Structure formats: structure tokens, C-alpha cells
Image (cartoon, grey):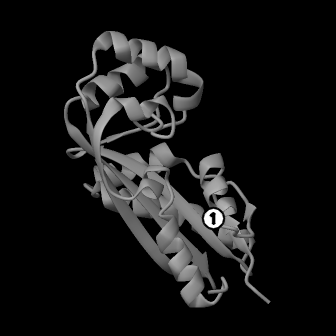
Amino acid sequence: MAEPIILASGSEIRATLLRNAAIEFTTRVARVDEEAMKSALQAESASPRDIADALAEMKAMRVAAKHPEALVIGCDQVLARDKDILSKPQNQQEAFDQLTTLRGRPHQLLSAAVIFGEGKPLWRHVGVVRLHMRDASDTYLTDYVARNWDEIRHCVGAYQLEGEGARLFHRIEGDYFNVLGLPLLEILSYLTLRGTLAG
């Protein structure tokens, strides 16, 4: 019998990606104080990559502790501009401020996934995407935030590439699934090699 798969995330986009790939899974949201953990790791000079990986592992571990029979996929995404890490905007002004600091220069999205099972992390991956935002005007960014606030308020960097946010960029280097917050192809490869998925 195949091992049950649990996605330790409340992200509808991540769930949709797995569903579209014909993966049977259930969802359990991991209760993790992300901001406190992120702050502690930054105080220890952890790299953005290590922070994304640690948060993904913590989420997977929390859910796996209650479901030891399952393979639990924990995910996290970190936006890094140079050595700075941005968080989800708390209000429209903060979203505007984030966009103005990103425009006209590149930044990175680090999309981490850790699969927990048998009481330990079995697999991990951090996908990196480099994004180049065009130098949009203050007027456009103000209007963009107002029009899209309900969608972007939960997004690090205050944009969604699958929506109007695509207009903010002139070049993207990397896997689109990583932009959406899930290194899908790598997860599918691991699950297939493990025998959890038919292949």
C-alpha cells in the first residue's frame, strides 16, 4: 500500500500544483511562528537559503509528529534582496515600499521543500529563481497594489506572477514552479524513485 502524503501547508497554489499532477494527498497546516524563527536564524547569520530550508523542515516535522505513517511535505519560500529577507506585507503601504525597493534590480526567490517520514527528514531541495523587476513608476505601483491587494497580501514581495504581477518583470531565470512556492518536478522525481508514485 502506498504511503499517504500530507502537504504541511495552507497554500492553495501548492495544493493545486499537486492536484494538477494527479497526486493524492491531504493537507494539514503546520503551526509554526515563522517570523520568530526567521528572526532567530537571521540573528545567527544564517543564509536566506538555510532559513528557507529550516522553515520547510520545521513545518514538515511538526505535522509528521502527529502523522508518523505519512510522508509529509513541508515548504517555505524566502525572498532575498542581496542579504536582506522580505516578509509578507502587513498593509498596502508596506507592499508599495517592498515593490519600490525591488524595482529596477534583481532579487531571488528561494523555494524550499523537505519531505519528512520515518521520524526524520528523508529528502530536501531548495530551488532558486532570479527575478529582474522593471523600473515601474510610483503611480503604477500604487495602483497595482490597490487593485491586487486581496491577492498579494499573502505574498512575499507583494506580487503574484500568475496574475498582473507578471507586468512588473522583464526577465525571470529559473523554474516557474519554484516561483509558485513548490519545487514540483524535484518532488515528483523523488516520490517516483522512492516508489510512492507509479513511474
Task: Determine whether 43 is above or below 135 in the image.
Answer: below
Q: Amino acid at mark 1?
A: Arg
Q: Residue furthest right?
A: 1
Quadrant position of the C terminus in the picture: bottom right
Residue 188, can we see it? Answer: yes
Q: At x 37% / y 18%, what residue is drawn? A: 141
Q: At x 42% / y 70%, what residue is drawn? A: 125
Quadrant position of the N terminus in the picture: bottom right
Residue 158, can we see it? Answer: no
Q: Position of residue 40 (x, y in %)?
A: 38, 51
Tell whether 163 sits left or right of 128: right
Q: At x 42% / y 16%, what residue is drawn? A: 93
Q: Where does label 1 land, which residue?
A: 62
Which of 71 and 1 lies nearest the eye of the viewer? Answer: 1
Tell whether 54 sits left or right of 119: left
Q: Position of residue 190 (x, y in %)?
A: 52, 81
